Amino acid sequence: MLAFTFPGQGSQRTGMGAAWVDHESWELVGEASEVVGRDVAALLLDADAEELKDTRNAQLTTFVMSLVVLDAVERTGIEPSFCAGHSLGEYTALVATGALRFDDGLRLVAERSSAMHEAGIAQPGTMAAVLGLDDEQVEVACRLADADVWVANFNAPGQVVIAGSLEGVAKATEQAKALGAKRVMSLPVSGAFHTPYMSSARDRLRDAIALARPRDTEVPVISNVDALAHDHGSEWASLLSAQLSSPVRWKHCLLTLGELGVRGFIELGPGGVLTGMAKRTIEDAKTISVATPDDLDALIEWMNVFSATSVLLASPAHEGEHLFAIERLVVSPAAGVFTKKMSVENNTKIAVGHVLGHVGETEVRSPFAGILQNYIAVDGERLTAHQPIAWLRSH
């Protein structure tokens, strides 16, 4: 099985949108700018490292860039069995699975980043990565510091992030080194994220999450808070608000995915740091990161190898029978209310250009040939551009 993973704040890079400007998926950037009332394209193309370090810019750009990559990958027909995201990336995962609409996700990320920025000003703090020390020993180091410092991220074996006051992190750093840490690296952030220092942001965000009304999904998302799979929308209001002041249990999320049978991990968005964490945590993980359009071809080749390996491992008696069905998503060409073409039912043979319905006044024509497996959009549902409408199977 496959999992899509999405990076968090800190993965942003100067000019990370440049490679995508001529790709169809870049349209999402214009839509994002309209929703949040900011020039997101300028941030993705022209902002320098200092400007992108601002929490409000870092989260918005990473979120939008990850969704641009997701949109491009969805056009290839590749779909996950599970999704997960690191901190901010959890919001991306929820939009990817349909638990949150694109516009609701944008508004929540804008509100979240603003709330975290202000919490960091009201109660200044910092973060540091502790390398080469077990989780339990890092927790001991925080307790021995006898100050405001806590574990903020369990990222991978031997990689834990601590956060708190400047004094607390400094003291915990000394304790960690005394316990045998190989290295402690200060992180360029503006607050002690995922600690009690974010309580004010949590209170501010709670109502906004409830108003977004997350929906039930077919593809579960693994939560940072409890490292469990969730597919009920009603559970996310408490999970997302708790996430702000609770440690990100990313290592545990990866272990959960492994226990659920996931062996393919596809990281979508800038950076590539989650790919390394998956390799360190899951011994037989097959990983790839997609950050640019050039990576899409590599992903398709990777999928061919991954699928062939998975089939051989699952069915060794049928070696030589390598007929793989390819799934293709048909996405909305515009925003508006979807009207299904009633004469097109499941298992109907579809040719390229076949009309599946309308979004507003715009025809939904399939860019692929194949067999219609199912409609994803419901008749009368209001869609955003690029939201999945149906999926086909071709040989």
Image: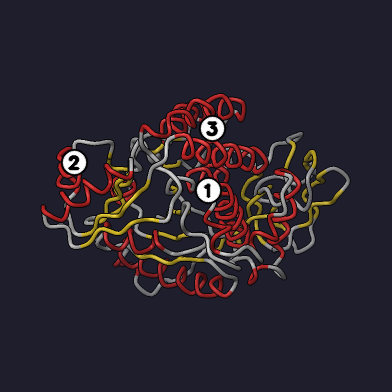
Q: Which residue is mark 2?
A: 145
Residue 68 in view here: yes
- Using a 10 Å C-alpha cutoff, classify the residue at mark 1 as few (fewer than 14 neighbours), some (14 to 19) or many (20 or more): many
Of circles 3 and 2, the one toward us is 2
Of circles 2 and 1, the one toward us is 2
The x, y position of residue 64, in whole percent, is 61, 53
Quadrant of residue 312 within the rendered picture: bottom left
Of circles 3 and 1, the one toward us is 1
Q: Give the amino acid at mark 3.
A: Asp
Q: Which residue is mark 1?
A: 55
Outermost residue toward the left in this view: 179
Work out whether residue 354 or residue 214 is closer to the camera in this orientation and state it: 214
How many angstroms separate mark 3 from mark 2 (CA)? 43 Å
Work out whether residue 144 or residue 320 is closer to the camera in this orientation and state it: 144
Is residue 36 toward the left or the right of residue 272 in the image? Answer: right
How many angstroms separate mark 2 from mark 1 (CA)? 27 Å
Q: Which residue is mark 3?
A: 216
228 versus 26 height, above or below: above
Element under label 1? helix
Which residue shows up at 54% across the image and 49% down it?
Answer: 59
Which residue shows up at 17% across the image and 58% down it?
Answer: 181
Marked residue nearer the N-terminal end (3 or 1) = 1
Marked residue nearer the N-terminal end (2 or 1) = 1
Work out whether residue 90 or residue 384 is closer to the camera in this orientation and state it: 90
Is residue 143 toward the left or the right of residue 311 in the image? Answer: left
Which residue shows up at 49% across the image and 74% down it?
Answer: 301
